[in-house]
Image (cartoon, helix red, strand yellow):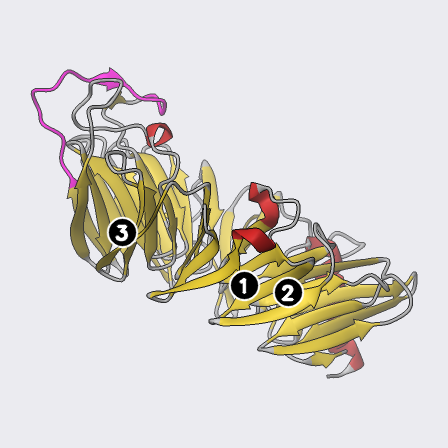
Amino acid sequence: MGKKKYIFILIALFSSKLFSQNVSAYIDKNGGFYIFDNGISTRYELQSPISYKIGGNCIAYLDNSSTFKIYYNGKVIKPFGDNIIDNYTVTHNLVLFTARNTILVFDQGKTDTLTTYRGYNPGVNDSLVVFQEGNTKSLLVYYKGKIDTLAIPASDLPGYYSGFGHYGYSYHYETGKNIVAFIDNLELKVFYQNNLYTLLKLPKSKKNNPYSYPIADNPNLKLGNNIVSFINPATKELSVFYKGLSYKLSKRVYEVQTGDDMVAYDDSLGLHVFYSGKNYDLAPVSTWVGYKPTTFSVKDSTLTYYTKGRLKVFINGDITDINDRWPGDYKVDTKLVVWLDLQNNLNALYDGKTYTLSTFVRPFGYAVSGNTVWFKVSPNEDHVFFKGKIY
């Protein structure tokens, strides 16, 4: 990597505090707006934008004149012309933005209008958008360029003002990266890969509204990529929907955390994880030291937990022992784990291998994003760890 490109990486990490695998952005000392893409940094605005947000494959921003723009595939476009927008959200794959009664989505270089009639209750997560159409109040989902109807409320039910300022029904739903769970007519349903599944019947809502069931009444409904976990209100059993199949895991669980293809939970027997269709017993209850519910944590597809005085990591079905204290100074993003050991050495677990990034001197700071680690070993010495190499 050339010196010039290396400097650009450091500036992007310092300035934006946000970094994806291939694209990032920063504002230089003169106010110019630069976009970093695959090793090349280019100035696109002479003046600082009002705001900008970095996604997995694009960067959305409001320029100095409030014009909404998106950088994608080497070009800056205006997905809504010179019209003013109200708000925008960026995920790994999508940009959702609203303008008065209109909801629009930018997906792989193309802009689609989802609804123009008082659309409300929108939510976006990685590769899908859920929203309600203002006329019929139907719950709809946008996924892979297609809009499907999830639920239609009965026309004879009395309406009410939702929290979004619209007269109608506000469906209760939760989203994962490619999956939606929602309540319709006291049934818990799932939308996954363009198919609908009914998981169970629910008791009557406290609000006595047969077309909604407060998620707050079932706080253990959690979603990740390809997966839904929930506590059956009748049996109190932890159940999982994963890639079209249903599993029953345990009764009387204490805590549940759900990630990508993963559900970690602890019960009277200890700590367990359901991963990629298989259940793993990680730590019997007798080995837990200073037990408390926060001694394990799931992020994306990585589980960190503490047992026998050691901090361990579960990734891809494999367990790695990384540290001897909890809570330790460590950070996780996707499948990259970075931590400081008792000797203040900075270490990384990446692609099944352990790397020592710095030794003897505690770093002045470090940040983890995607598969990249920025760390500072002295006031004037910055480094980047990227895919097994230090720059």
Q: Look at mark 2 in the image and give the residue it sits on.
A: 337
| Along the viewing direction, whichever of 334 and 105 lies nearer the viewer | 334
Q: Look at mark 3 in the image and give the residue it sits on.
A: 142
Which quarter shows the N terminus?
A: bottom right
Residue 262: percent from left, percent from top: 42, 59
Q: For the magenta stretch, what is the residue range? A: 151-165
Secondary structure state at the residue bearing disc 1: loop
Local crowd size for mark 2, using a 10 Å CA cut-off: few (<14), some (14–19), many (≥20): many
Label 1, label 3: how far apart the Cα atoms are: 25 Å
When asked about the image quadrant of residue 348, the answer is bottom right
Q: Please tell me whether residue 159 belongs to the stretch shown in magenta.
A: yes
The answer to whether one can see residue 122 in this image is yes
Q: Is residue 13 above or below residue 234?
A: below
Give, as a three-letter code, the residue at label 2.
Val
Dominant SS of magenta comes to: loop
The tag on residue 365 is none
| Residue visible at 84% across and 64% down in the picture | 376
The tag on residue 334 is 1
Residue 173: percent from left, percent from top: 31, 38
Local crowd size for mark 3, using a 10 Å CA cut-off: few (<14), some (14–19), many (≥20): some
Secondary structure state at the residue bearing disc 2: strand
Give, as a three-letter code, the residue at label 1.
Thr
| Residue visible at 58% across and 77% down in the picture | 351
| Residue visible at 38% across and 58% down in the picture | 225
Give, as a three-letter code, the residue at label 3.
Tyr
Do the CB atoms of the residues marked 3 and 2 lie less than 8 Å apart? Answer: no
Residue 207: percent from left, percent from top: 25, 17
When asked about the image quadrant of residue 130, the answer is top left
Q: Please tell me whether residue 48 belongs to the stretch shown in magenta.
A: no
| Residue visible at 50% across and 61% down in the picture | 282
